[in-house]
Image: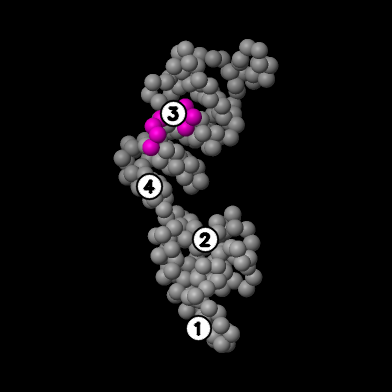
Amino acid sequence: MNYLWEALLKAKEEGIDIHKLKFKIAKSYSPYLELAQENLNNIQIKEDIPIELNPYYRFEEIFKEITSRELERYPDLQQGLFQILIVMIGENDLKRGMNRAEYEKKFLYQDIMSGCYKEEMKQAFLYFTKEQQQIILEGMRHLYTIGASIDLLRHILISLFPDSILYHHKSQNKLLIYIREEKTEEIEKQVKTVCELFGDLKYNIEIYYQYHFAILGVDDTCRIDEIALYGGSNDV
């Protein structure tokens, strides 16, 4: 994360009231970054942990008076003014920062949580982490723009399960999906949810977990006790 609006968006996603967040002028920061935390990819958004900002990155005209040496003699006043202004700016910044894509994903998420995609989909969606949910929502945006495709399904599967493989059996209109992870209730619900959302209805889908099915001529798939039988019992 780099911008103020990204930190506020993360706070909203975690159910934190942005008016309860604390902000302060960073003493040490990069002139090329707005957020001043050491690890920008793992910023902890909590009400009791101040978010440090570089006030000159985008808002120098607004904060140059507040950060003046004269006002530094009154740290409580300086901090209070900074807190009030940054919350006001942040709310406007958040609206501008949330582009069309973010709004579309927000509405898709609300539709899922309200049961528009049936109750089973809502419950299955809760098995995904926040990051995984964002991958699915982004995929749904593309789905409604370009339609279902094998490439989109493959992209979502690999994004969620990095070692997964999707095979297209053209002569039988069948898709074979291999998930390297052990089959658990959670993993099974996740994979089936992805297939229901992004799989084209014209394809039959078979899913294999942990053990890859044997492919003649490919030794790595033909190891004793590490292969699955290719058949029709794993249909979605």
Residue matched to label 1:
77
Most prominent secondary structure in the magenta stretch? helix
Tell me the residue at 63%/12% (across/down): 216
Q: Are marks 2 and 1 in contact (CB under 8 Å)?
A: no
Label located before the other in sequence (1 or 3): 1
Q: Whole-percent x and y of residue 60?
A: 52, 73
Q: Whole-percent x and y of residue 200?
A: 40, 26
Report the Cα–Cα distance between label 4 and label 2.
20 Å
SS under mark 3: loop
Report the Cα–Cα distance between label 1 and label 3.
58 Å
Residue matched to label 2:
3
Furthest toward the front, the residue is: 61
Tell me the residue at 46%/18% (across/down): 174
Count of marks, rendered view: 4
Report the Cα–Cα distance between label 3 and label 4.
20 Å
Label located before the other in sequence (2 or 1): 2
Image quarter hosting the C terminus: top left
Which residue type carries mark 4? Answer: Glu
Label located before the other in sequence (3 or 2): 2
Label located before the other in sequence (4 or 1): 1
Q: Are marks 4 and 2 in contact (CB under 8 Å)?
A: no
Which residue type carries mark 1? Answer: Leu
Display coloring: one colour
Residue matched to label 4:
104
* Viewer-proximal residue among 234 and 142: 142
The stretch of residues the image draws in magenta is: 145-152
Report the Cα–Cα distance between label 2 and label 1.
25 Å
Which marked residue is nearer to the observer: mark 4 or mark 1? 4
Q: Whole-percent x and y of residue 27?
A: 62, 73
